[in-house]
Amino acid sequence: MSIKTKTIQPEQVQEEYRIGTDYKRQLGDRGLYEQSRINERFYSGDQWYGVNCGDSRPLVRYNVIKRIGDYKMAVVGAPPVAVRFSAEGVPCTPAVQEQVARYRNALRQGAGAQHLTPEVTAQAMAGALTDYFGTTAKRLKLEELKQRVLRNAYITGTGVLYTYWDDRIRTGLYADEARTTPVRGDINAEVLEIEQVYLGDPTLEDIQQQPYVIIAQRRPVAEIQRLAKACGCRSWQMVRGDEQEGKGGHATLLTRFWKEYGEDGTPTVKAVQVCGNVTVRGTWDVGVKLYPLSLFRWEEKRHQAYGESEIPYLIPNQIAINRTVSAGVWAVMMMGMPMMLVNGDVVTQPITNDPGQVVPVYGTAEEIREAVRYVEPPAFSAQLNTQVQSLIQDTMAQAGVNATLLGDVEPTNTSAIIAVREASLMPLSMMQSRFYTFLEEVAQIWSEFWMAMYGDRALKISEEQATWYMPFDSAACRDLLLSIRVDVGEGELYGEAKTVETLDNLYKSGVIDRKQYLSRLPQGTVPRLSSLLQELEQASGETA
């Protein structure tokens, strides 16, 4: 299969980058860049930015935007997930599963490689990738990356995870038995802001159908020059910083990805890096068939590749809440500590308003009565607090958050609370499904890199009992068709309470014994549970 690689000039990439920035500036009423900055300020609590109210008035913040976002992000991202690979087109009978189990156990015990049938090999590799995904997820701190993707999606509308091959990573493996040739290079991942990602056709929702994708990254000029020099760029000294105030030491590095197709229609991803009019790194083969970016959109829009945040629609309510609460606090302060008027001709010394202060006053009795007095504040409506609380509750309810979901209820009836909570969580199920699809795309991209870049190396498998390595030949597995499924664990707020209640009923009904009851309790419920189970086994053995 031959693929004719086309040459991409820096001027073309810069023009495509300019078109992408112009498009983002036209999104919405304020453009993507400005709206994202506003959303960030309101989420973080800087909600009085640009309002010249002085220092005399209390500027109160009741941040409902952050509370709504934190809750939804927790619901979507908190449940533990496990990614499972399976080989399509290969039978997985009980006999095959038994052979795979024996093979894995032999490797776990330190035995060498064995001759396996193609079916057993395929299923063994799929199981190894399932375990190795967890190993890689721990190495790359996927849980932290997921949180950052969710936060970016809530604030800007779109979260992006970028996977790339990093030659600098040390694996601890060696290509020879003498351990003289270390194996270097592995996948790495980085969370990108949507402001850094530019899609060739912003009306296509599927990123894999994009004609090209550009990533813009701010880098020190010296770093870009080192990269260009290492890639053989003769004009690496021509890399200059951006001509913008305060950014002289940095420049924008543009990485353009596109797909080229062979005679059989198989795609391969190509890339080029440019900075200004300098080609920092010439066209190279990324080695995968998919764009190495995974997108999660908070809210989807038809014929729009970029997602949409709900914060712009919460900002008017947030402003009204802050203004109303601030007005109420100011009114209470004026009633408790009203403004004082002092006749400077009669009272000659400073007034500190301290309790018991003696104020010498000189003049007639009338002048003394008028020397110091308080300004009566306007009438304060007692309904203001009720209106504020109603506005807060209505805002959060319209956003899909209520007191039951936030846990602001007395758990006197767990079953009723669970029922109400499950009904309230139904609107978020679609968002959860999109997030799990995002994780499946991440797993698909990782498997593409493993198949294309690993070559002949062992996969690290970490288990509770031991850590061992499974032989892996990426060339032999490159044609393996993998199916990916995300399994979601228990992540409900009342999951443990519900579990304990169910176990109590089963134990009282005699369906399970005490050993079965204790072994199924949520982790951490009973301290030193394993020792307790061993003691029960010993006691039952002595009784027998």
Image (cartoon, rainbow, N blue to C red):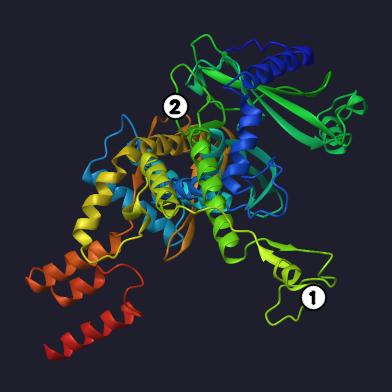
Q: Which residue is mark 1?
A: 361
Q: Position of residue 9 (x, y in %)?
A: 77, 13
Residue at point 53% right, 33% down? 312
Q: Residue furthest bottom?
A: 542
Instruction: Say whether residue 151 is visible.
Output: yes
Q: Nearer the viewer, residue 505 or 37?
A: 37
Quarter of the image where the N terminus is located: top right
Residue at point 40% right, 39% down? 436
Q: Nearer the viewer, residue 110 or 217?
A: 217
User: What number is the disc on residue 145?
Assistant: none
- Kindly indicate the quadrant of the structure image that contains residue 7: top right
Q: Position of residue 370 (x, y in %)?
A: 71, 66
The local crowd at label 2, few if under 14, some if 14 to 19, many if 20 or more residues have their Cα within 10 Å, is some
As measured in the structure, the alpha-carbon distance from the residue carrying label 1 to the one carrying label 2 is 71 Å
Can you say whether 272 is above or below 155 in the image?
Answer: above
Quarter of the image where the C terminus is located: bottom left
Query: Mark 1 is on which residue type?
Result: Val
368 relative to 66 in the view: left or right: right
Q: Which residue is mark 2?
A: 300
